[in-house]
Image (cartoon, rainbow, N blue to C red):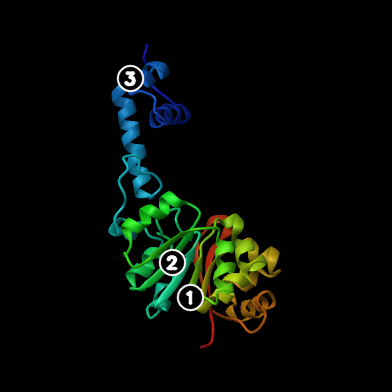
Amino acid sequence: MLRERCNAQEKFEVVEAVIQGMDLQEACKQFEVPEDRVEAWLNAFHTAGKRSLRFYADGSLPTVEQVEHSAQRAFPYKLFHRVESACCFFTAQFYGKNDVVHLNRVGVKNVTLVDLDKKKLEHMEEIYPETWETVVADAFEFASAALAAGKQYELVVCDPYSGMASEVSFEKGKLFFDLASRFFCSLYTKPMFEDDLGDLQLADDPIQLGRRLGEFYGGEVNVALIAKRSSHLDGIYWVVIEKKL
């Protein structure tokens, strides 16, 4: 007997079963749900996934226009309109909608995308300019090797998972700071201002933040911009450090 109603968990379970390879009719029989209902749930799941650039079950890829449509608007791309080279780390999860798509928008010619997700990077090669480079590598190892080889980029962007933000910007932040010749743009969380820097007001004070960051990077640091990008974890920010030429 087919059920008239299913809760959210049951819907998820049947959709997940089909996505993982179970025959649709078998799934409907096992979960006692009509085919047309499961097909509707699958369609809704695929549509929502594409909208957020999380899921492309049919193997298709988003276009640059689709990435731009879902792009995060807080990225300070106007600061980088004259940048010629950039290196972006932790960037493949959402096809670069947080940062990379904006660099394409302002015409940065030479961009290197570094991530451990080989498949996503291969997808990004098809979306972004052929002149751009993708590198499957650990961010810290790549940055260390690049510095050892005397390499620098005008702009370095780090967009790690929020749980890694402190490690990227503070514990090992000097790696990325030194790799940038003009701008270092990185993700910060509000708890970082409190736990790592000891003053919540630093989120609103670029001058004082620059002084504190100088302790991590060694020397004078100019914070060009602090831009709130979301309310997750009480606040997620882009912090842009500009070096003197």
Q: Nearer the viewer, mark 1 or mark 3?
A: 1
Q: Which of marks 3 and 2 is in front?
A: 2
Task: Look at label 2 and name its amino acid.
Answer: Thr
Residue 30 locus on image (x, y percent)? 41, 17
Looking at this rendering, what residue extends furthest in the front direction? 149
Residue 164 locus on image (x, y percent)? 60, 57
Q: Name the residue under label 2.
A: 112
Q: Mark 1 points at which residue?
A: 153
Q: Mark 3 points at which residue?
A: 25
State if disc 2 and disc 1 touch (CB < 8 Å): yes
Residue 102 locus on image (x, y percent)? 37, 67
Cα–Cα gap, marks 1 and 3: 54 Å
Judge whether residue 100 can be spotted in this image: yes
Q: Is residue 187 shown above or below 209?
A: above
State if disc 3 and disc 1 touch (CB < 8 Å): no
Q: Which mark is residue 173?
A: none
- Local crowd size for mark 3, using a 10 Å CA cut-off: few (<14), some (14–19), many (≥20): some
Q: Which of 145 and 236 is in front in this view?
A: 145
Q: Is residue 27 shown above or below 1?
A: below
State if disc 2 and disc 3 touch (CB < 8 Å): no
Q: Label 2's element?
A: strand
Cα–Cα gap, marks 3 and 2: 46 Å
- Local crowd size for mark 2, using a 10 Å CA cut-off: few (<14), some (14–19), many (≥20): some
User: Horizontal placement of 213 versus 46: left or right?
Assistant: right
